[in-house]
Image (cartoon, rainbow, N blue to C red):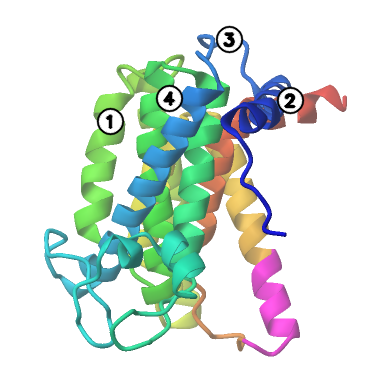
Amino acid sequence: MRASLPRPVEVELILQPLFVFVKSVWYNSHQHEPVGYRVVVLYTLVGLVVGVLLNHAADHLPQRRSILRPIHCPSCGANGGWRDAVSLVGLLLSHGRCVQCGARYPLRRPLLELVTALAFGFFWIRYGPSVQLAFITLYCCLLFLIFVIDLERRLILQVVIYPAILLAIVGSHFYPGLGLRRAVLGGITAFLFFYLVMVVGKLAFKRTAMGRGDVNLAAFVGLIVGFPEIILALVIAISLGGLVAFALLLCRVKKLRSYIPYGVFLAVAGVTVLVFGEEIIGWYFGLY
């Protein structure tokens, strides 16, 4: 027999306990109360759409092409419909292949859409409708985009990072508990640290050990997390980068003088401290 689809009442009985459980685990009680799981679902769908736009930007910005051009297949150039634009839908309906030529789309597309959608839903559960929700959403979207482009192209684009730094400076006036002083101090600390690493690395290895884009990204992360939280972000980025580099060397995927995109680890550290910094710091000092 053909299985029947769940009725709306059954779906609601499934979603509501799941929402209550996630809320009880991750909800930040200092923020405003979320209005309900239906709005979480709606904000998650907004995140899915934003994920599509981030994919589009990641495809075109490194090529210096306008992001206003329609979404098309990178293989045959055919303009895709909504099924091709939303890669998660295309993955289900056409197995992640172009409808026109059958070429497979990069796995990054559905993954970025999924991560962005889940992040949006989580942010609403945690922060509710608030100023903090707006800025964390913006900052994380920028870090997601920087992560993808640096991982694939080894580039941190000026057209992305400079407006992001300007946004972080302006946003420090409105972000709860941050302020311009803590933001600027965090940005300067991160900038000077990575600038020193860049200069010393160039003198020691006679080559560029770290790009200027990484230094600018570190400044952006420092601006959005502030001081002293930037110290935690630097520890996470350095530790994560060191572990990944050691694993790649051990597996002989990379050589000792191979370049590793460090912006990827800075982006991960920035999102981690921006969202979970208070919990991590509280846990650490609770050990003593």
The three-letter amino acid code for the residue at tag 3 is: His
Q: Magenta residues: mostly which secondary structure?
A: helix
Q: Earlier in the sequence, mark 1 or mark 4?
A: 4
Q: Quick check: marks 3 and 2 in contact, CB under 8 Å?
A: no
Q: State the extent of the magenta-drawn residues as a range.
A: 243-253
Mark number, residue 21: 2
Mark 2 crowdedness (10 Å alpha carbons): few <14, some 14-19, many ≥20: few
According to the image, label 4 marks what residue? 133
According to the image, label 1 marks what residue? 169
Q: Earlier in the sequence, mark 4 or mark 2?
A: 2
Mark 4 crowdedness (10 Å alpha carbons): few <14, some 14-19, many ≥20: some
Work out which residue is located at the far front of the displayed protein and give it.
1
Mark 1 crowdedness (10 Å alpha carbons): few <14, some 14-19, many ≥20: many
User: Closer to the observer: label 2 or label 1?
Assistant: 2
According to the image, label 3 marks what residue? 30
Q: Position of residue 66 (x, y in %)?
A: 12, 64
- Cα distance between the residues tagged 3 and 1: 24 Å
Residue 246 is a magenta residue: yes
